[in-house]
Image: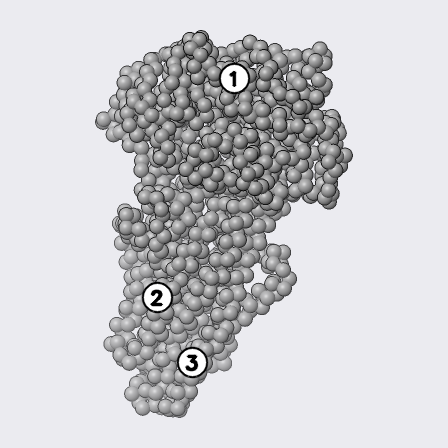
């Protein structure tokens, strides 16, 4: 029953502490996945304390589990004791007493094992709850962190933390109570009884255990550095392989020379060089511990024979010490495995703490939450930096309810960032963004979401049915509404041609063209039908025959709404009432298309470039296309 | 024993033999461990016969010391070898799996859950490594230890040994039943983990969508479902396995008591009546009890290893599932001439065998070396698919695709891919430096060549503004860059590759006008004298193409130059009409 999936650690001792400091001030998950840091003071306490903190929440079950654990631990002394008493009874010729001792042994064994199982079952149930709690806690957390977090943390790393690490934490919790109590109380009980009986034997029985732990601490100290390297490289392998899986098409098209597998191969090579050092410094040497921990008879037996030869000890006492020393060896082996588990938890708990210590976007409390008075947007002196690069610099703009505005500017000018700040993927550094007169930070996230619809440049589709993917913005949408939205986004026809129509499960959107995916994303926004619509390069991939229809759909959708369009295809935004030209995070020009063209400023240059690009003709003959005249 | 087959498959014959030998040698440690209680019992028996002496004490001490030395001699080299074998197995197996994954047709990934694949490459591989270095030798060692102890106990007192063995066998029966249960339970768990992995990965990747759209209920439902499933599955597993597990442990532990009790009952009165004087007669029973007690720890460990072994088997099954997916076989041709005519002959293809319609339906055309070929058609008409077929992302069902008059299936895959440089609509970058992302195009490119390509793709100036220049990390999937910057890096990568066949699939869709104009120039340079395929929604781009292929519903309905198609092809004219109206159309 206690066969859970995580007993790998029984043979993999980890160091108690490692001390690679990450160069930057705030540790990132990538760091934590890569470095097993565990002594960083800012992150506070060790694994046992953290685990204990979670166990404590289930007090009643915990006490029950501990009580059962303690009983089974104390009962470890019973079999040797009953055996010795039985031998004693036989020696004085009392058969019925001997029979009772035999019965006592059977009963104590059964009681001990039942207690052990009870303790384990309860602690596993606690663990299952803690596991689910932790996963939901992390999930809540990563919904609140600024989105830049995901630039540094791959989904594979997050999978490792939420799935694999938490799975391992279960092991710590499930075994902490019964086995830790047994492993600590067992030897103590045995020691007390032993000393009471004969201190010389007690010393002989405990000496190998003492030696074993002495060796262990020497080995652990010596192997700290190599173990750290070992786990670092293992994490690198996992991360590199995760990446290969998510970029298979590129990997395939650059198959030559394995260049696309470079990171994975480099990690493999490095692993090869670390591996043998780790085995040598850690696994091989740990045998010293194994040998001594399983040699409890080594002093007891010669001492017993000697004492018998001078008549200084009785046979039953000698038998007791042989059996008790063997029991001690077993307990020490399990103590070792519990220690390893806890040690392994250190690294895991560290990653958990790193993730939980990420700064969050401040959430307003329900009582202080404000309701936007209308659907206007006001960028008020907004400054925002990412990675120490200033993206927006004292950016101010008023967008009245029901008006439309287009952001244009070179790639990297900050125009997409404006949309992302509006979605509160990040918070501004200085200034404020107001929606209907309320600072975004004072609006509940639900309210904010209800006000905004987005169509992003990168379309992400979940591996769920088409209908469920569209329903994301409106979970209670009826099938009719979904189909209507899909029709408006020109997506209905191709959806109907899929094998199971709207019930077709999309595997990450495979088999759909980029234009089709984008139309699904537009359908999503149409279905949601929020009062403010943000389009970030929404029609970049639209195909000619759909573009017009899609634009029509968007125009219908946008009617009466506050509309923000980010576009590089300038012809699509010609008619927008206000065009805002952005460069280096500042507004450099605003006006209507005609005004801006007349001004002959940066916009007009872009417009010319756009016209040139429009009339570009691809050719592989030696001629240039740049001097061809634009048509319109 | 499927795992042993895998070992044979992955490790060399010599290594495999060596590994098996090492495993057996390490198992002799079981015999040495068992020798300790045996030695104790032997000494005790001597003592019970009144032969205890200082000399005896010294002899037993010497024997224990000898055992210690022997264990030292056996454990060190075997541990070293076992771990090194398990890791080199792990490395080779992972490399193999990765190459297999890459050699799969892309279609395989439509039905393959990525979470599961990543679970196989991480957790499942760990279980197999663990199996080699730890579980397998431990099981063998414990079996050796138990057998030695039982044999010794039989010699001392066969009656109580048989009784004890009987109880333990009953318990083992329980464990065997449990094993069936456990295998089923753990299988489910493994599948559940794959599902959960997928949900978590999407939860992270889809975070922008979830943040922007997720309403009260919609956002985390799948994720929560996965968490709930795991919790319930786990609880069920605990409840299902607890009774049998408890019974096993209790039976094992109690078997000694039962044996002792029976031993006492079987003793004849004379022995007991003899009391202390007849102590020697008690020796066999006491000896057997000590030896049987020594069997309990290995018996308990075997229970735990049993679970680990099952997990290793499930991992092996998962890996086998992945391995049995048919990969695209590489051809034998390893050189091509400089002429790169590309021809499609009666090519048909569909993604899904159940699909009613062909995605590509009987397409034939030839693209002469050095010509510009445009592919146009409505969305979903098969334009991108056609190009993916040329790169053997999938293999076709009917017809032939030829490069340089050779069937691409007969060309070595790396050589084939060497011939083609691509820029896709969707850019994929690795979380590595910019330089390394560019070098994917040509690993041996010099720094100067790198800079030249970046300049041509209009990305050099931007890279120079970064604090660490070409050594800057692009973030997960290029997240530190804007869409246009990513696309320009992908273009630079293709420029650097400088292959004789070029595929541009909406290669400038994410660019702002100024960059686009400049890059178009770069394309003109790149395309010179090459066989070029262009998929462009902006039809004005391709009016000068040597050949325009018009696709509709997977069929090639017309091909020719712009002027002829304008005259003859209705669909082409329709596309233009759409295009021109789209151009004139504006949002709002």
- Where disc 3 sits, the SS reads helix
**Which subunit holds the residue at mark 1?**
A
In the drawing, does residue B396 fall left or right of residue A37?
A: right
Is A1 above or below relative to B112? below
Q: What residue is disc 3 on?
A: B64
- Which is more toward the observer, B46 or A561? A561
Dot 3 and dot 1 residues touching (CB under 8 Å) = no
Neighbours of disc 2 within 10 Å: few (<14), some (14-19), many (20+): some
Q: Residue A563 in the image: state x and y as whole percent.
A: 40, 16
Disc 2, disc 1: CB below 8 Å? no
Q: Nearer the viewer, mark 3 or mark 1?
A: 1
Q: Which of the 4 image quarters holds residue A493?
A: top right
To which chain does the residue with label 2 belong?
A
Under tag 1, what secondary structure?
Answer: helix
Q: Is residue B493 visible?
A: yes
Task: Tell me the residue at 46%/25% (across/down).
Answer: A411
Q: CA distance from mark 2 to mark 1?
A: 70 Å
For residue B18, which quarter of the picture? bottom right
Is residue A197 or residue A302 the one in the foreground?
A: A302
Instruction: Give me the residue at 28% from left, 50% from top.
Output: A41
Pinpoint residue B58: horizontal percent, then vertical percent: 39, 87
**Which numbered marker is on residue A610?**
1
Q: Residues within 10 Å of mark 1 (few under 14, many from 20)?
A: many
- Quadrant location of the N terminus of chain A? bottom left
Q: Position of residue B282 (x, y in %)?
A: 40, 84
Q: Nearer the N terminus, badge 2 or badge 1?
A: 2
Quarter holding residue A81: bottom left
């Amino acid at each position: 029953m206690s066969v859970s999936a995580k007993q790998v650690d029984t043979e993999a001792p980890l160091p108690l502490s490692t001390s690679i400091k990450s160069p930057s001030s705030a540790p990132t998950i990538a760091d934590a996945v890569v470095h097993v840091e565990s002594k960083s003071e800012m992150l506070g306490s060790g694994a046992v304390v953290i685990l204990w903190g979670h166990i404590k929440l289930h007090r009643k079950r915990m006490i029950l589990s501990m009580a059962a654990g303690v009983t089974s631990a104390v009962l470890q002394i019973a079999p040797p004791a009953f055996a010795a008493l039985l031998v004693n009874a036989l020696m004085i010729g009392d058969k019925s007493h001997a029979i009772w001792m035999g019965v006592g042994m059977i009963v104590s064994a059964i009681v001990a094992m039942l207690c052990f199982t009870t303790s384990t079952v309860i602690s596993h149930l606690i663990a299952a709850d803690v596991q689910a709690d932790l996963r939901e806690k992390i999930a809540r957390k990563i919904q609140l962190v600024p989105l830049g977090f995901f630039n540094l943390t791959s989904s594979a790393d997050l999978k490792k933390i939420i799935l694999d690490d938490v799975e391992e934490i279960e092991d710590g919790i499930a075994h902490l109570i019964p086995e830790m109590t047994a492993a600590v109380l067992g030897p103590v009980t045995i020691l007390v009884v032993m000393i009471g009986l004969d201190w010389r034997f007690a010393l002989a029985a405990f000496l190998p255990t003492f030696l074993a732990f002495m060796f262990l601490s020497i080995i652990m100290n010596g192997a700290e550095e190599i173990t750290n390297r070992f786990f670092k490289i293992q994490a690198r392998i996992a991360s590199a392989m995760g990446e290969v899986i998510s970029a298979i098409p590129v990997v395939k098209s650059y198959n030559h020379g394995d260049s696309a597998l470079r990171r994975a191969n480099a990690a493999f090579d490095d692993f090869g060089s670390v591996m043998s050092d780790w085995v040598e410094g850690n696994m091989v040497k740990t045998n010293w511990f194994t040998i001594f921990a399983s040699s409890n008879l080594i002093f007891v037996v010669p001492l017993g024979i000697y004492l018998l030869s001078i008549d200084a000890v009785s046979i039953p006492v000698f038998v007791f010490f042989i059996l008790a020393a063997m029991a001690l060896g077993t307990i020490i082996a399990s103590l070792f495995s519990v220690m390893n588990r806890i040690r392994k938890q250190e690294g895991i708990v560290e990653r958990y703490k790193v993730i939980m210590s990420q700064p969050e976007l401040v959430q307003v409390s329900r009582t202080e939450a404000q309701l936007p008075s209308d659907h206007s947007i006001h960028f008020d002196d907004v400054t925002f930096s990412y990675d120490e690069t200033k993206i927006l610099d004292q950016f101010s703009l008023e967008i009245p309810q029901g008006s439309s505005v287009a952001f244009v500017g070179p790639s990297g000018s900050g125009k997409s960032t404006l949309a992302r700040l509006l979605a509160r993927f990040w918070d501004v550094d200085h200034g404020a963004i107001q929606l209907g007169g309320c600072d975004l930070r004072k609006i509940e996230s639900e309210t904010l979401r209800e006000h905004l619809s987005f169509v992003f440049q990168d379309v992400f589709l979940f591996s769920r049915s088409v209908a469920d993917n569209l329903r994301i913005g409106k979970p209670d949408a009826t099938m009719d509404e979904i189909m209507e939205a899909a029709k408006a986004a020109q997506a209905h026809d191709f959806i109907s041609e899929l094998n199971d129509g709207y019930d077709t499960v999309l595997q990450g959107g495979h088999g759909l063209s980029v234009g089709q995916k984008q139309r699904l994303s537009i359908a999503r926004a149409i279905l949601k039908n929020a009062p403010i619509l943000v389009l970030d390069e929404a029609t970049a991939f639209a195909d000619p025959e759909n573009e017009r229809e899609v634009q029509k759909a968007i125009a219908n959708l946008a009617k009466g709404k506050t509309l923000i369009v980010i576009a590089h295809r300038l012809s699509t935004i010609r008619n927008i009432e206000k065009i805002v030209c952005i460069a280096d995070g500042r507004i450099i020009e605003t006006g209507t298309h005609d005004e801006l063209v007349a001004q002959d400023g940066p916009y007009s240059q872009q417009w010319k470039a756009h016209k040139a690009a429009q009339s570009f003709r691809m050719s592989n003959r030696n001629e240039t296309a740049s001097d061809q005249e634009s048509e319109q | 024993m499927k795992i042993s087959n895998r070992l044979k498959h992955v490790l060399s014959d010599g290594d495999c033999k060596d590994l098996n030998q090492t495993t057996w040698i390490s198992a002799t440690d079981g015999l040495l461990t068992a020798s300790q209680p045996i030695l104790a019992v032997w000494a005790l028996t001597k003592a019970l016969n009144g032969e205890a002496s200082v000399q005896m004490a010294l002899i037993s001490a010497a024997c224990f010391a000898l055992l210690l030395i022997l264990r030292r001699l056996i454990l060190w080299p075997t541990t070293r070898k076992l771990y090194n074998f398990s890791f080199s197995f792990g490395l080779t197996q992972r490399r193999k799996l990765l190459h297999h994954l890459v050699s799969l047709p892309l279609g395989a990934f439509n039905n393959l859950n990525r979470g599961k694949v990543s679970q196989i490459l991480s957790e499942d591989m760990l279980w197999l490594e663990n199996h080699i270095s730890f579980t397998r030798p431990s099981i063998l060692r414990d079996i050796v230890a138990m057998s030695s102890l039982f044999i010794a106990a039989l010699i001392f007192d066969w009656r109580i040994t048989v009784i004890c063995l009987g109880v333990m066998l009953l318990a083992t029966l329980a464990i065997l039943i449990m094993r069936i249960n456990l295998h089923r339970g753990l299988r489910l768990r493994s599948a559940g983990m794959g599902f959960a992995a997928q949900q978590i990965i999407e939860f992270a990747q889809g975070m922008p969508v979830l943040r922007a759209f997720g309403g009260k209920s919609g956002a985390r439902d799948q994720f929560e479902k996965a968490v709930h499933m795991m919790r319930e599955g786990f609880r069920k597993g605990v409840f299902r396995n607890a009774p049998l597990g408890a019974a096993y442990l209790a039976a094992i532990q109690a078997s000694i008591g039962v044996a002792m009790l029976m031993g006492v009952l079987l003793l004849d009165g004379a022995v007991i009546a003899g009391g202390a004087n007849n102590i020697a007669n008690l020796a066999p029973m006491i000896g057997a009890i000590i030896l049987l007690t020594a069997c309990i720890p290995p018996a308990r460990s075997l229970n735990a290893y049993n679970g680990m072994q099952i997990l290793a088997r499930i991992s092996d099954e998962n890996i086998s599932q992945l391995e049995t997916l048919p990969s695209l076989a590489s051809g034998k041709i390893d050189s091509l001439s400089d002429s790169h005519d590309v021809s499609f002959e009666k090519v048909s293809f569909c993604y899904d065998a159940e699909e009613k319609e062909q995605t590509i339906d009987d397409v034939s055309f030839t693209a002469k070396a050095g010509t510009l070929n445009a592919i146009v058609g409505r969305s979903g008409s098969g334009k991108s698919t056609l190009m993916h077929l040329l790169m053997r992302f999938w293999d076709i069902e009917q017809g032939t695709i030829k490069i340089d008059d050779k069937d691409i299936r007969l060309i070595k895959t790396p050589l084939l891919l060497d011939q083609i440089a691509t820029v896709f609509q969707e850019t994929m970058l690795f979380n590595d430096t910019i330089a390394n992302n560019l070098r994917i195009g040509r690993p041996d490119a010099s720094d100067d060549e790198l800079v030249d390509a970046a300049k041509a793709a209009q990305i050099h100036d931007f890279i120079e503004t970064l604090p660490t220049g070409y050594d800057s990390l692009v973030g997960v999937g290029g997240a530190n860059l804007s869409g246009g910057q990513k696309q320009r890096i992908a273009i630079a990568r293709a420029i650097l590759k400088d292959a004789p066949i070029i595929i541009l699939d909406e290669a400038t869709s994410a660019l702002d006008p100024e960059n686009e104009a400049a890059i178009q120039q770069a394309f003109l340079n790149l395309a010179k004298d090459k066989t070029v395929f262009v998929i462009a929604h902006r039809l004005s781009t391709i009016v000068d193409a040597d050949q325009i292929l018009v696709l509709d519903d997977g069929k090639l309905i017309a091909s020719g130059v712009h002027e002829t198609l304008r005259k003859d092809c209705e669909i082409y004219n329709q596309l233009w009409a759409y295009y021109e109206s789209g151009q004139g159309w504006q949002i709002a």
